[in-house]
Image: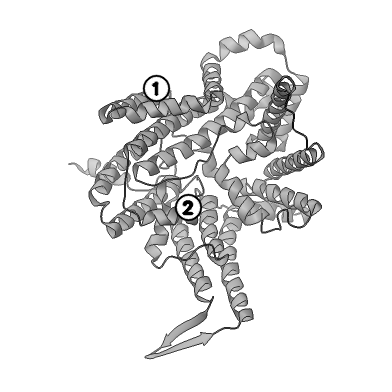
Amino acid sequence: MGEFELEKLWSVFLYNPKEPLIFSSGLFLFLFTAFLLIYAAIHKNQRAKIIFVTAFSLFFYYKSSGFYFVLLVLTTLVDFTMAKLIFKTENDINFSLGNSKFNFLLSDSAVKIWRNLFLIFSLTFNLGILFYFKYTNFFYEIYTTLSNQKFEAFDIFLPVGVSFFTFQSLSYTIDVYRRNLKPLNNPIDYAFFVSFFPQLVAGPIVRASDFIAQIFKPVVVTKEMLGRGTFLICIGLIKKAIISDYIGINYVDRIFDNPTLYSGLENLVGVYGYALQIYCDFSGYSDMAIGIALLLGYHFNINFNSPYQSINITDFWRRWHISLSSWLRDYLYISLGGNRKGKIRMYINLFVTMLLGGLWHGAAMRFIIWGALHGIALILHKLFTSIFTFKIKNVFVKKPLNLLSWVLTFHFVCFCWIFFRAENMQVVSQVLNQIAFAFNGQIFMDFIKGYPVVLILMALGFLFHFTPSSFDFSIEKMIVQTPLFLKAIILVLLIMLVVQFRSADIQPFIYFQF
């Protein structure tokens, strides 16, 4: 093997900021195949399995964010230690000095103080990481604006998935603090949980209470798990690499890069296109993450449940990014008081939760507005349902009302996506202005002729989204019953199809930026 071939082979294992390792890339398929061969050979050895998967997960994150994988290691060590201290302080503090051992019994007040301090340290460390990497420039810009100084942004790299693994790790220390969970004794076991590569960089946010117990069980991959995993990986690839990437590159990006070059009709379709793009991109990642985990013998909870079928905004947040919305509910909304302190306080807590949820997605006023709009909508829906508590049973009245409610919910969500996608508030204004005052509907037929593939993929994407869940289950059941060699053929054919649609550059998942 020549020097060039060796250098090329070595480059596969080095971080390349232009080519992050993602599920829909050929490199991941190659590495994952090698990973599976080793995993199959050692999975019965519990300790070897945990060490190997943890090492591969850290390598996976290194290929996504380079040297910043050290942050993942530090987060793991800090939260593992804090959780142990929180649990240990419950009864006493033990330490050794030479050959002598000391034991201090703490009063109830001292126990509470120490537990709070250890939790505060964990919160400060994790939220401090988020603040530095995501919000330093945001708040610095506000400071320079208020003080009439020139703003020059700091060159701060945002590590991929930092919001996900910090939230996941925080759930562990908070659950230990709340006495809902006992801490792990081995830091490698905890590193396995935090760094598990299928969901590491874009979710779903896996709770320690849901996952840790699975680590120590024998690996069992049933026929149903293999079939469902294959089905979800295929669906995820179709959503991400065929629908989301194609309509994003060939239409949505063009609209939002310069809305004034396009008519209001084209802008409106661009908004619908982004609604489909972000759903297919993010749910496609979740599908692949859940599918890959199943192939390894682990179960994740569902993260998307046909969110655009929602008939109200509360229903939407029960279906969209379920792991994040439930995390915000359990660790932020409830911590603020939830609905335990009266309706006014409940509405305030709900609004603050959604506002911070918007800020979690990005350090910009448009994300804050996006969160605020959803917060206001949730409050209005709760107010409406508390006033009109009766249930409509007449089907001739109920169905039209549900249809109207769905139309309003879908378009409200799409309206909010404009703030989410636009680079700045000027672009938001331009998109809305074009839709309202430059619609130009007479170009409809020319528009269809100009973007046939984009419109076909959008139609197929929304059609699949609105098909009954029973249809998905029937397809999944069919794949479960398919022989293994046919499953492999389906994957190969799908990969060939993906190659036909892919662009020259790797398209990272949208949520990598959060």
Kind of residue indicated by mark 1: Gln
What residue appears at the point 49 percent right and 66 percent down from the top-left corner?
Answer: 78
| Image x and y of residue 195, in percent | 42, 54
Tell me, for residue 488, which label it has, or none.
none
| Image x and y of residue 291, in percent | 40, 39
Query: Residue 4 versus residue 60: which sits nearer the camera?
Result: 60
Kind of residue indicated by mark 2: Asp
| Image x and y of residue 256, in percent | 63, 29
| Image x and y of residue 134, in percent | 60, 52
Looking at the image, the residue that sits furthest to the front is 393
Residue 335 in view here:
yes
Q: Which residue is mark 1?
A: 500
Which image quadrant: the N terminus? top left
Left or right: 225 in relation to 359: left
Left or right: 14 in relation to 323: left
Say if 20 sits above or below 272 in the image.
Answer: below
| Residue 22, quarter of picture | top left
